[in-house]
Amino acid sequence: MSLVETQPLTDNEPNTIPVVPSAPMANGDSIPTAFDPKQLRAGRLERLRNMMREQGYAAVVLFDPYNQRYATGSRNMFGYFLRNSSRYIYVPLEGPVILFEYPGSAHVSTWLETIDESRTSQVVWSAVNQRDGMSSDPFGVEIAELVAEHGRGNKKVGLDRCALNLARSLEAQDLEVFDCMQDILHCRRIKTPEEIACLAQSMAGSEAAVARVEQAIRPGITENELFAELYGEVIRQGGEFIETRLLSSGPRTNPWFNEASDRVLRPGELVALDTDTIGVHGYYSDFSRTFHVGPGKPTPYQQSLYQMAYEQVHHNMSLLGPGIEYREIAEKAWKIPERFLNRRYPSIIHGVGMHGETPLVAHHMDFDRFSKDGVLEPGMVVSVESYIGEEGAADGVKLEEEVVITETGVEKLSRYPFDAGLLGQSS
């Protein structure tokens, strides 16, 4: 694939936008950002069906909007279906992919080459109308008929959101029902080249949004106003939504996980943010930065926090590469000073794709509780996390980078500069 730039495409855009050649980025980035949308969809569906073959599924029924998009590129009223699991897609190992859609909206997706047929959902309003008991049997009967037609006697069916009434309806039809979410997430851990191009485009949009925030930082502005700058630019860049509101200032930077509020920034404080953005093409962008509110210079204590976070991220990035075991990462990770240990970030690294994904590697003292053994593989994309803050102090620093695991090491997807003043590099 050549090094070219392309205008943002969405999975629901049927028209191909011309690719415009351009030079590689000045920093030597070698990650292409152009891709063929049909190849993107074909590669993901192929990976899903390879997983189904390995795990012995005759079919999976996808209710999760992320999995629906992964399998087909289809997206419809994303936020609504995150909470209301009434739209589903039937994906057999062999046979037609069938979309069970919200009434009147099939046209949003039926142009996709990955959708062979569209029908109306059997459960579209059942929960809100207390009709789950009435809709479950028709759902189960219809899926069972499809499995009988295409499954060649195999009766193993996966549900990624395993609603009890729907699972029972399938079992009543003599199907073997399994929760397939973990299998799908494991399948999604390796990104195709087209997915990595999407991730690169998503990152570029998020970096532009963070630049808007940095430019707007001044005494008197509120956290909410800064978050509006972030969100607005994400949308302008073709992104979709932000999963969290992690932007805080001053004493609200410690502990981490305070969300944006109406607090007014004051001189000399820190502002920390985490992008957590579902960007262009539905791909996640996840990096963090901390800034100083002028006028004036950061305090030595603020600089020390920032420099420790910077060291943690870069030390831990240096450990990454193909074949490296998760447990080895945990054991060799940057040693957090004792006074900061209680407020450590939960993970050293976590996977990135359409959202925060597999794997999650926790710190060595938490590894057996939160993680499992495994190895990094080429094609994985991970974010490397750091939070440095101590109990009883006002300031905390959040930094994070996003990288691709390559055949020989890692390559950074996040390119946003670090704060020179907080690093002690400004004159």
Image (spheres, rainbow, N blue to C red):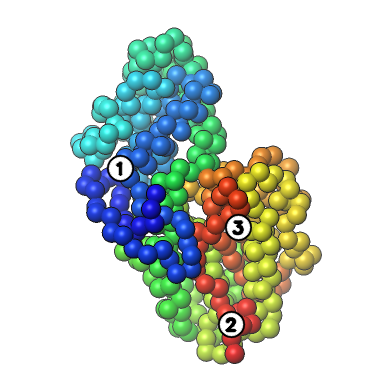
Q: Residue at x 47, y 62 (%)?
A: 29
- Report the residue marked by disc 3: 384
Circle 3 or circle 1, nearest the eye? 3
Task: State the SS at label 2.
Answer: loop
Task: State the SS at label 1.
Answer: loop
Rounded to the nearest angstrom, the CA distance separating label 3 from label 1 is 31 Å
Please tell me which residue lies in front, 183 or 222: 183
Q: Residue at x 42, y 31 (%)?
A: 46
Tell me: 335 left or right of 147: right
Q: Indicate the quadrant where residue 42 lies.
A: top left
Task: State the SS at label 3.
Answer: strand
Taking the view exactly as shown, the residue that stands out farthest to the right is 338
Residue 203 in the image: state x and y as whole percent.
44, 59
Residue 47 in the image: state x and y as whole percent.
46, 33
Q: Residue at x 58, y 54 (%)?
A: 410
Q: Tell me how many marks there are.
A: 3
Rounded to the nearest angstrom, the CA distance separating label 2 from label 1 is 44 Å
The amino acid on which the numbered mark 3 sits, given as a three-letter code, is: Val
Q: Indicate the quadrant where residue 149 lies.
A: top left
* 34 is higher (above) or lower (below) than 58: below
The amino acid on which the numbered mark 1 sits, given as a three-letter code, is: Asn
First of labels 2, 1 by sequence position: 1
* 153 is higher (above) or lower (below) than 140: above
In the drawing, what numbered circle is on residue 299? none
Q: Residue at x 44, y 53 (%)?
A: 199
In the drawing, what numbered circle is on residue 76? 1
- Report the residue marked by disc 2: 421
